[in-house]
Image: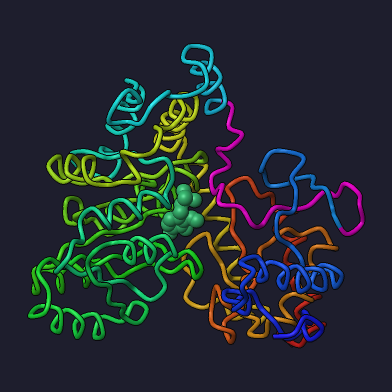
Amino acid sequence: MRKREIEGTDYSLADFYEYPDKDLFAKAKELAIYLDDFTKRGHNSYRRTLLTPCDHRVIIWDDMTKQKKEMIMMGSNNYLGLVTHPKVKEAGIKAYEKWGMGAGGVPLLSGTLDLLKELEHRLAKMKGCEDAVVFSSGYSMNLGTISALVRRGDVAINDKLNHASIIDGSRFADGDMRVFKHNDMEHLEKILQYSDNKYNGKLIIVDSVFSMDGDIAPLPEIRKLADNYGAKIMIDEAHSTGVIGENGRGAPEHFNMWGQIDIVAGTLSKALAGVGGFAATTKEVADYIRLYARSYFFSTALPPATIASLIAAIDVIETEPELRERLWKNIRYMRENLQKMGYDTQNSETAIIPIIIGDDYKLREMNRIIHEKGIFLNPVPYPAVPKKLSRLRISLMATHTQEDLDTTLEVLEEVGKQFGIIE
Ligand SMILES: Cc1ncc(COP(=O)(O)O)c(C=O)c1O
């Protein structure tokens, strides 16, 4: 690759992974040239800076116009709007006053506050499990939990569309990794057959709601296959918690599979509106994870104010079902109208709605105009997804108003027609 050849139309981030040069930082120099060009075209939507809290409307600092800009937020994981919920904020403020800023240690040593034990207990109860281990992020939960359990001679069996942190956890583990085609039970069975002779322990891992497509894993079928081949199941409830299930308790409730999923894991950063991750399971397995997950015991426990707000967020999920009802009203309205317009929204069933564009340059250009028209959503180009499935990704919130939804739909209709994605 030569510097002068780099143009935003032809390149993606995948082109800068490696750069053979004695200067270790030469790759960063090359990337900077690409980013410059990319930014001049108005395609750089990374790190748009929020000047107000993450709510259904935000004010950002617009780097293109060098001005403040009000936008409709259609790109946040704050599904129930709990980031700014008064009870959630108040709990955090009170805990800050009582406990100060940090936990002061890793959870195995001095960092376990009684608040942390309460959060573990509440999460375990929510997911129908005996115990829950709380990590400092969802990413570190997947890294730590999978690598603690999948040892040499074992195998992690992943859905192809699993979140990057699950894939990274499986790579980091001493055991092997196998991948089955997305939600394809025949392929999963083939891999289980093959793995039965080759490996000792087998862990099937899936997102219960997939983070880029918003569809749901067929857990009853996965359970049957797992039983036939003596495998365990771990699900990542990042986008399920607070969203699916009659009371927002996630996939075990959605499928009425209480006690049938071996590890019900997830993040505390989406509907629960804070930061952190959890792995809910039996007491025995939880204790094993605590002592063998390196990202757990080598990392400081969550700060008390965050923990208190997370407990309050669970309270709100349990006592204010109207928030989830509003979220689902918004999901249905948006999905139906996007499909009516002719957009391909894949098999989305939840608050994440992909709009397939299938051409990275078009995707960037469309997003530039959508941004200019005041809608904040996330373009997802290659290599995050295959080139022909590059997409705009919408995430809905309970707090979106009818006006937010209709304005977004109007913009998407106009821009989709302009670029020939819909007629
Ligand atoms: C399915 C899934 N798992 C894990 C993560 C990582 O969680 P966190 O952001 O809490 O580290 C995410 C978040 O982006 C996710 O979507």
Above or below — where is 209 with respect to 283?
below
Magenta segment: 64-86
| Residue 182, percent from left and from top | 37, 78
Looking at this rendering, what residue extends furthest in the front direction? 22
What residue is shown at x 33% (from left), y 62% (from top)?
172
Q: Is residue 231 above or below residue 287?
A: below
> How many numbered circles are shown?
0
How far across and how far down the image is residue 122, in percent?
31, 33
Left-right relation of 119 to 175: right
Is 219 on the left or on the right of 372, as rendered?
Answer: left
The residue sitting at 20% across, 70% down in the picture is 155
Instruction: Say how the picture is coloured.
Output: rainbow
- In the displayed orientation, state which residue is furthest to the top: 98
User: Which picture quadrant has residue 359?
Assistant: bottom right
Q: Left or right of 298: which side holds 156?
A: left
Q: Could you tell me which residue is drawn at 15 percent across and 74 percent down? A: 225
**Residue at the spot 8% in from the left edge and 74% down from the top edge:** 228
Residue 301: image x %, image y %? 39, 32
Viewer can see residue 186 = yes
Quadrant containing the C terminus is bottom right
Q: Is residue 411 visible?
A: no
Could you say where residue 24 lies in the image, as x and y percent from the top left? 61, 67
Front-most of residues 128 and 368: 368
Magenta span contains residue 226: no
Quadrant (top left/top right/bottom left/bottom right) for the N terminus: bottom right
Residue 129 falls in which quadrant of the image? top left
